[in-house]
Image (cartoon, grey):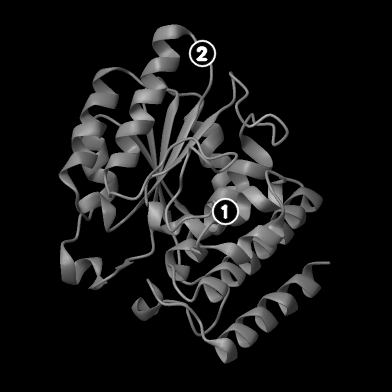
Amino acid sequence: MDAAAKKQLELSACKVRMGIIEGVHSAKSGHPGGSLSCADILTYLYFAKMNIDPKNPKMENRDRFVLSKGHAAPALYSVLANRGYFDTELLKSLRKIGSILQGHPDMKHIPGVDMSTGSLGQGISAAVGMALSAKHFGGGFKVYTVLGDGEIEEGQVWEAAMFAANKGLSNLTAFVDYNNLQIDGTIEEVNSAAPIDKKFEAFNWHTIVIDGHDFDQIEAALTEAETLDKPVAIIAKTVKGKGVSFMENQVSWHGSAPNDEQYEQAMAELKATLETLQ
């Protein structure tokens, strides 16, 4: 990736993080930690990878994206807004009565959302169904999904993984947002699925382990995925709360919104990052 393209992605990711903080602060609820950790992955997919058109969200041959860890909706909404699916001002309406931006993605009302998610484990199952449909009907599109490392404690995830490999869904790529924290603590304290790559390999997936905040590594992994004849799991090592110093690696920010003072600090940090990139 050339320097100019990488810088543009870093700028976009910073703006996405600002949108996440804007939304959860305005809502006084939400999930900032896991939204910030997957922001770079979503930014790369929507700004550099997927075949999409914000002016035509239902384009038939568009690539599909499923946010399996649906509680990270602030990240998806911010990416969609910054990509042009709707006005960024709408992010301030997160979780408010009458807003289309519910606490979890809603495919019926939000432009650009391909699947309603929130019940953990179900998102990847829907993604598998989409990939199977593309294979069966010759749709030609690719399907991407992002799971949480806590989410993959759900048994349904592994049923979907088994099915995807059995059907040879080479058009399916799953990212695992491996930030090592879930609502009750570290994944080791709760019910660790480690080694995650070996488990996916046991279900006959190809696996790639990367730094989930490095756009070069994200790009290389997705390029490699397109050369394979089986589904691919990209294990992306990330930092919960990435980009906001007092949120990073703190489990308390899994589902807490910043107060006014914390909001000002978080936005000041992100604006400073933005200025260094411009």
* Number of disc labels: 2
Q: Which mark is residue 139?
A: 2
Indicate left or right for 243 with 151 as reference. right
Query: In terms of depth relative to the viewer, which is nearer, 168 or 73?
Result: 73
| Amino acid on which the number 1 mark rests in the picture | Tyr
Q: For the point 53% across and 37% down, which residue is it?
A: 222
Residue 104 position within the rendered picture, expressed as x and y whole percent measured from the top left: 42, 53
Determine the residue located farthest toward the right in the rendered image.
Answer: 278
Determine the residue located farthest toward the front in the rendered image.
Answer: 98
Q: Is residue 251 above or below residue 143?
A: below
Q: Is residue 136 above or below residue 263?
A: above
- Which of labels 2 and 1 is toward the front? 1
Assess whether mark 1 and mark 2 are in contact (beta carbons under 8 angstroms).
no
User: Which quadrant of the figure contains the N terminus?
Assistant: top right
The reply to whether residue 212 is in sight is no
Indicate left or right for 192 with 32 as reference. left
Q: For the point 20% across and 53% down, which residue is it?
A: 153
How many residues crowd mark 2 within 10 Å: few (<14), some (14–19), many (20+)?
some
The reply to whether residue 156 is in sight is yes
Quadrant of residue 223 in the image?
top right
Q: Which mark is residue 136?
A: none
Query: In terms of depth relative to the viewer, which is nearer, 195 or 61?
Result: 61
